Image (cartoon, helix red, strand yellow):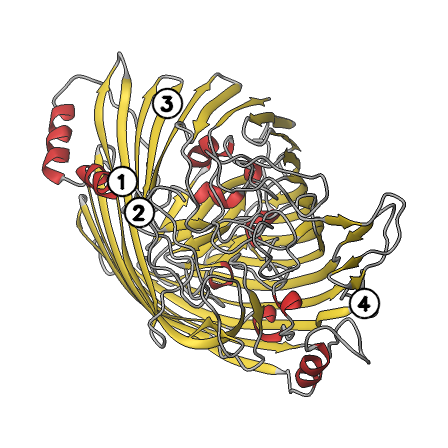
Amino acid sequence: MLPNRKPLPIAVSLALSSFWLPAAAQAEADILTSDTPMMTVVVVGSQPIDGEPGSVTLDAADLHPLRAATSDTASLLRDVPGVSLYGAGGVSSVPVIRGLADDRLRIKVDGMDLIASCPNHMNPALSFIAPSRVDSIKIYAGITPVSVGGDSIGGTLIVESAQPQFAKAGEGLLTTGEVGAFYRSNGNAMGVNANATIANENLSLTYTGSAAQSDNYTAGGDFKTSTATGRLGHTLPLDEVGSTAYESINQALDIAYRNENHLLDLKLGYQNIPYENFPNQRMDMTDNKSRLANLSYTGDYQWGVLKARAYSETTEHEMDFGEDKRFWYGSASGGNTAINGIPCSPIGPTCSAGMPMNTDGQTTGLSVSADIALSRRDSLRVGGEYQTYRLDDWWSPSGAMMWPGTFWNINDGQRDRAALFSEWETRFSPNWTSLFGVRYERVDMDAGDVNGYCTTGMCMGNQLIDSAAFNAQDRSQTDHNWDMTALARYSPDTTQTYEIGVAQKTRSPNLYERYTWSTWTMAAVMNNFVGDGNGYVGDVNLKPEVARTLSLAADWHDAEQKIWSARVAPFFTYVQDFIDATCNGASCPDGQFNVLKYANQSARLYGIDLSGQVLAASAPEYGDITVNSSVSYTRGENQDTGDNLYNIMPLNAKLAVTQQRGRWTNTLEAHFVAAKENVSDIRNEVETPGYSLFNLRSSYQWKKVRLDVGVENLLDKHYALPLGGAYVGQGTTMSINPPAGIFPQWGTAVPGMGRSIYTAVAYTF
């Protein structure tokens, strides 16, 4: 068990020091009265006066230093106040905004609404794009405008790759590009990336490619008592985190045509993930192929801007047990061997217990929107969207308990959305801005008949009873969802800004929440996209979630926004028909994994995000030294049961000191997290101790070459991930609660990565 340390009081004191406005004002006066030249400082989380209300944007300059340390696009958000991450595979973590995650967020990648096609959500939206390809991310952590919201109750993430480049008039052919490579010591991770553009004044062609791979990573110390896994002769060191290896390959082609004020852009993408293992899931991804086509049009007219988009994405997804979870029985000469008295089929020279699972998903979308300038102070945004989604999820027969037929988890799943929205933005004066919007969505869902591994005779568990009950239901569902947003921003002068917003947002259940049907333990535990080790059963009659949010923000800064800033942003959200979990059986004992059922209840979330920065010093000898800090607190409660909501990040703070001198940039970063004690009882969520981490990174920029080096977890701290879920990364995962001495057992949280030294180099031509 990790020691329960409480570094937060110190962390909060340090972080809040940058909010002490008299000190900041004095620093500003000292600098302004000196003869030292100042440099512009870009601070993550700052809110410019003329920026879009309620949003924060990370541009290429913000993102570049973070890419060297990660192959996971979601982790690029780690420094944004109010944002945290669900632990998952090495390229597939899930962002959380103020306690709401996954399908509760609207995530758009180059204008596409992408959907996870997997009963464990191993391919979330942000896993479709590599970090090296991301050019900007816009985050709406508070009130989301209806023009970028829809079918979600949390915030919105708008992820964009680089805009197409064209040659300037009269300069002939443009050729440019970049090649890069990285290495990280923990997990022996390595990868490469490249992009190249050739363009004239009207036509642009860009290729982008990347590849990354890693072995299992190691924790900062031993976190388990046995090296054994289910596979005979296969062991893992006590500090090695099983099922964390991965390999990912991404390629994209961008063809763009520009004619005066019109831009036509076709993006083609292909992703291949040969394997990605998951320490908090009972299965691993053994293959994932995704193909997408994304055609967009943007036209600038005298009346405003017209945008249109059509896209299609297909996913072929496979799961089974990876090396750390696969187990073998029998002799080298083969032959049937019984597992718990049940014969298994010989595969190769031994009897191998596997469980192949396949998922095919197809998403097709259309959208049209217009930004109309009604007057110098008024603009109107109107638009419509249509999306269809098809899902098949089936598990082929493979041996003991899993034969003779095919198990249909979801058969011919359908989820279609049609939306219309209207949004009016007004600048009453240079000091006041308001935003009002209404959005309507119709969501139609359905699914076909299902069956278990057998259709007649004796079946393991209640497969026949459950499938018959499911097939007898009317599975067609139609939801009529309304979103409304009202936001106002007041800037009395150039040193302060205030925002207030209220919103109603609605999300319909996903296909897995409505249409997974089997209460059989072994099948139920394969349906879990929160990584808590439990099994889940859906409910056809689930209602849409309706969230009502009040969000406030106050931002103080110097007039030029170069010396200091401080931001305070409290929020409160009440969710009607929140989709939580209840016990599926007569009881759910403590201290073990159980089978749960999705159910509508009510919930509330509230908290506060604080952030600030100050230019502490500036001189030719040592350059500019800035201090950035943030504190985030979120509380989530189930109003019906009094239970805590699952996977809520505890109180946490960050403090970073950055020195920038000429081409050098150096940062020392500290991350403090309180003990996680408010856990979900129904899910038997594991408590985690508090911890503090220190990271060091440095970069040097030549004319065409950039070098990044750094150390993550500088002191090799042993800690548990508060949102990492339950450790089921090795052993016989087929059993929901295996005997003592066999992994996985309830009570072990997924540990964080130990010390990792990394370096990355990029050459631009």
The mark found on residue 666 in the picture is 3
> Horizontally, is 362 left or right of 372 in the view?
right
Marked residue nearer the N-terminal end (3 or 1): 1
As helix, strand or loop, the secondary structure at mark 1 comes to loop
Is there CB contact under 8 Å for labels 1 and 2? yes
Observer-side mark, 4 or 3, equals 4
* Depth order, front residue of 443/2: 2
Find the distance from the CA under tag 1 to the CA under tag 4.
53 Å
Q: Is residue 425 above or below residue 137?
A: below
List x then y, in percent, for residue 276: 65, 45
Observer-side mark, 3 or 2, equals 2
Marked residue nearer the N-terminal end (3 or 2): 3
Q: Amino acid at mark 4?
A: Trp
> Horizontally, is 449 left or right of 739 in the view?
right
Q: Tag 3: Cα neighbours inside 10 Å, few (<14), some, or many (≥20)?
A: some
Find the distance from the CA under tag 3 to the CA under tag 1.
24 Å
Find the distance from the CA under tag 4 to the CA under tag 3.
58 Å
Residue bearing mark 1: 7
Is there CB contact under 8 Å for labels 3 and 1? no
Residue depicted at x 65% and y 74%: 518
The mark found on residue 403 in the picture is 4
Residue bearing mark 2: 674
> Horizontally, is 287 left or right of 505 in the view?
right
List x then y, in percent, for residue 427: 28, 59
Is there CB contact under 8 Å for labels 4 and 3? no
Observer-side mark, 1 or 4, equals 4
Marked residue nearer the N-terminal end (4 or 3): 4
List x then y, in percent, for residue 155: 41, 59
Q: Amino acid at mark 3?
A: Asn
Find the distance from the CA under tag 3 to the CA under tag 2.
27 Å
